[in-house]
Image: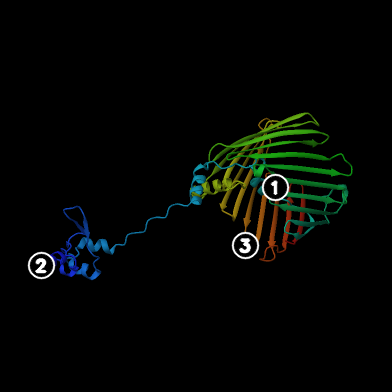
Amino acid sequence: MVLSSLLLPIFRTKCDSAPPPLPPISGSGSSTSSGETILKPAETKESTTSSLPPPPPPTASDSNTTSTSTPPPAAPPSIEDDNITKAAAIVSSCPNPGPLEGATWDVRRLTTLDTYDGVRVDISKQLSPYFAVVHSFHLGTTMLPDGKNSSYGITTQMNDEEGFLMARVDPERGTVDGRIHRALLGGLAMAKLQVGTSSEGANDQLLGEVDVGAQTWTANLKYGSMGGGNVFGCNYFQQLSPRIAAGGEGMYIGANGNMMSSYTAKLSFPNVNGEEKKDDIAMAAASAGGGPPGEAPSYLAATYNAGQGMLSFNYKRAVTPARVNIGASLECSPMTLESQVVVGAEFNLTRSKMNVCVDGSGRIQSVLEAKLGREPGSPALNFAAELDHGKNVMKFGYGLNIGS
């Protein structure tokens, strides 16, 4: 008995021992008195769902919140948008005024028309995307020197991203004229070279210029030989406010020893329709893009030439943008009280353009240009006329432009 009682615990199986205690229901585990944690087995989704109490019924506020979808979070701004925002923030409200020579270019275009008599024909040919040739004929005219009534010239021009080169040859007069414009320093400056030679050599000229511009100003330096003497000068044009610009120019002519100076002030007006904000944006965007400044729809410019003692006023107004423009120019001498006034108008139609100008002496000039097709490069027919009743002079001519 004693031996059996000693061997009996040795051969006792696990089934004969007492079952272990059940794991607790609440919680993922329970700690015993000895500090050991007993993990409960994983429960199935059905048992968990059935053991949870039913959810409460939705209220009115909850239904409104549920029906309203939450907008997705805004995407963070990209690096490109960030750069554009920074660039727009540093752009000044004062645009670049452009070169001083172009301050009154629009008025001169309206009040100084290229009228002629006889027949003028221009035939142009685009030999490549960068190279073009123009043949010009002028027949039956009384405007040429030496009593000639005809002329012929050939013009070649090459353009690229950095500038252009142009040359014109007149075989009858024996003259060669050339121009070279090239961008420097990545577009920060523009170098210009103007050359004019003739068979006689008396009127040969060579002039070099450098244009430098910044955000609100432009400057020009020039040096060369003209009329048998050296010429050098400079000018500066500053935009003082979004509507006001002022500048001046000085030049020394070595042939006669004259020192010339002029001063210009320009006042721009808002659009006639009151769209002042759009005008400011267009002018600022054009100057920020590195191109020429956006031209104001209306402006008044005053120039005083100290060397000649002449005071001039130029006014331009866009009655209908890109359709009807008018301009007026008044030149007077404060010392002698002599004056001259010219008024011009331009009408742009679908396939034609009409320019008319009248001066104080009663001279009337007009130029009509009509496109003969809708495609780019279609031929254009021109009619020019000039009537001067005071001098009893009449000139009529027509021209034809053919080519791209």
Q: Nearer the viewer, mark 3 or mark 2?
A: 2
Going by the image, does 347 lie left or right of 129?
left
Q: Nearer the viewer, mark 1 or mark 3?
A: 3
Query: Which picture quadrant has residue 211?
Result: top right
Residue lying at the far left of the rendered structure? 1
In-image side of 364 versus 59 (left or right): right
**Residue 257 image offset from top left, x and y in percent:** 78, 28
Contact, mark 2 vs mark 1 (Cβ under 8 Å)? no
Residue at 62% in and 57% down: 348
What's the residue type where badge 1 is placed? Answer: Thr
Q: Which of the marked residues, 3 or 2, is nearer the chain's N terminus?
A: 2
39, 53: nearer the viewer: 39
Q: CA distance from mark 3 to mark 2?
A: 131 Å
Single out the mark in the foreground, 2 or 1: 2
- Residue at left offset 73%, top offset 49%: 164
- For label 3, the SS is loop
Going from N to C along the chain, the mark reached first, 1 or 3, is 1
Q: Position of residue 378 (x, y in %)?
A: 70, 64
- Furthest residue toward right: 200
Q: Quadrant of the C terminus?
A: bottom right
Q: Which kind of residue does numbered mark 3 sit on?
A: Thr
- Residue 350 has which mark? 3
Which residue, given by chain and number where applicable, does mark 2 sit on?
1
Q: Quadrant of residue 329?
A: top right
Task: Name the amino acid, label 2.
Answer: Met
Which circle marks residue 112 in the picture?
Answer: 1
Q: Quadrant of residue 219?
A: top right
Q: Who is closer to the viewer here, 375 or 354?
A: 375
